[in-house]
Image (spheres, helix red, strand yellow):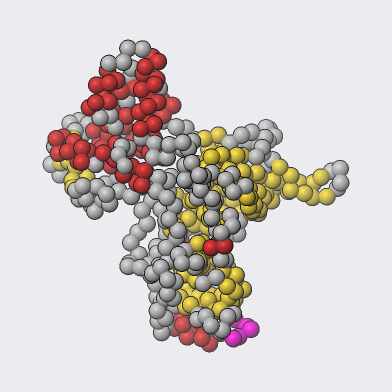
Amino acid sequence: MLIRRAFITLAGILFGCQLTLAADPRAEWDKPTRKWIKGPVSCLLTPEEEKQFKAMKTDAEISQFVQDFWARRDPTPGTPTNEFADLFWKRVGEAEKLFAQPTDPGPMSDRGQVYLLLGRATKMPNPGKTIDWVYESLPEVTPGTFTVQFSAGGGGNPLLLGKKAFEQILAANEFLRGLGPKAAQIYAPKPALQELPASTDAAPPVEVASAESKLLDDNALNDTLPEAVHLTLRTDLYQATKGDSFLVITLAVPKKDATSAALVGFARLIPYAADMKPVTLAAADSFGPAEPENSDPGATFLLFQAGTGAHPGRYSLLAGVRDPASGKIGMVRQPLEVTNFASGTLQLSTVILASQLKGPVTPPDAGEGKRAPFYMGSFRIVPSLDGMFHQGANLAWYYQIYNAAPDPVSGKPNLTLEYEFLLKQLDKAKNEWKFLPVTKPQVVSNRASQVEAFSFQLVKPVEGKPGSGWVAGEYQLSMKITDEVAKSTVTQQLPFSVVP
């Protein structure tokens, strides 16, 4: 059960106001009262902790007990974030919706309590005499594969069967309750660098002879490229291993230009340096589609994505799509500088403004040595190619931070993240258009994670209430990341537009 840091969801921004967090079920269930033990946390309590709690006589003792309870389950003590608690309360909110039943609240039902500890089952066959939840090949769990059964009857209140066997699993895997040395590496793993799709030495993919590779050969030196299909190209760069980088290529085609959604993407990375070899992505499965986005009738673009390792340096990137149904082809060429992230100075990966951002999620199996398209680690990210976001939609961004100095005491980075939103407005005093702040700077301090993902809703303005939401216009997201240990800073400005 490999668990990654969940991204922080920002509930919304009202102009001139602070960011507010989404509703948190812990506000209802985590109050330090005598009823606390009867809430969702009951599944986390060890027999000894339960005994200690019942012996408490004063409110102060209970309050201290609850504080110590979560401190024991904090995989990153000394930081403002308790990753295990965040995951647990996220599951509580999900259980409230998934397992509502006539008697107990969802998180207190038998199914809810199992869900809080184990998460969603790998398989959930159609109920027969029992409701079976099958957990398969769970990393770090002993045994790795097992089935949890519930009664199928009970008037809508399925009861856990085989409680003794389930308790044995919990006893053998104390990290499921947030305890023990494994908890830190499971609930707050050190951010791994994006691994290359095949190996750690940036070996290029094996070139496959195909119609697409021939198109690349034929057009490698041409100034004029096929334009029967309009094509937009986006590249994103991340640190990989052994001083190399990981390149993600996203292709976008207007739906009106395609006979069907079954387009074939292809690309070639042509180095300027004579001693470096080209990297070709021209196999049938080199580029994968964004689903379910491509199947959405309301979608404007069809999106396809591929990734490959690349040595730092200057390249010419030649990319295209072929429509097998019509035979139409579209190709583009652009220069590309592959960043050297091993410089030792504080750096950022590409910052992606995303139309979709979800996590933590388990990427689908793309085959040995391959990366599933539109996934980066445990996040699913669909970039916005045009930077346009509708009022009421979510604005999200994702990036990675490299070379932050470790704090000599904690051994972890100490980062401060600052975000500010600016709107293009007319400066009447100077009679010129400027990007002016529309919110107070949003500051996140004492951040140890070097993988950052945020999302919030662009709430619509309320008619008759100026400043109540996001008006249409051109914006900038101004970012400032400070390494408090090394006293170094990097900044980034990202343009985007809000439309009705």
- The single residue placed furthest to the top in the displayed view is 57
Q: Is residue 209 above or below residue 249?
A: below
Whether residue 333 appears in this view of the structure is: yes
Image spot of residue 303 (x, y percent):
49, 64
Image spot of residue 355 (x, y percent):
53, 53
State the residue at coordinates (65%, 39%): 441
Q: Which residues are magenta?
A: 221-225
Q: Is residue 47 above or below residue 243?
A: above
Q: Is residue 300 above or below residue 104?
A: below
State the residue at coordinates (23%, 33%): 110
State the residue at coordinates (42%, 50%): 190
**Residue nearest the viewer, comparing 245 with 438:** 245
Does the magenta run of residues contain 222?
yes
**Residue nearest the viewer, comparing 294 with 114:** 114
**Residue nearest the viewer, comparing 311 with 4:** 311
Left or right position of 11 against 370 = right
Image spot of residue 297 (x, y percent):
47, 58
Residue 232 is drawn in which quadrant? bottom right
**Residue nearest the viewer, comparing 15 with 389:** 15
Left or right position of 237 against 50 = right
Residue 196 is drawn in which quadrant? bottom left
Total numbered labels placed on residues in the image: 0
Left or right position of 98 against 324 = left
Image spot of residue 352 (x, y percent):
55, 56
State the residue at coordinates (29%, 20%): 53
Does the magenta run of residues contain 272?
no
Whether residue 497 appears in this view of the structure is: no
Main SS category, magenta section? loop
- The single residue placed furthest to the right in the displayed view is 430
Left or right position of 24 against 458 = left
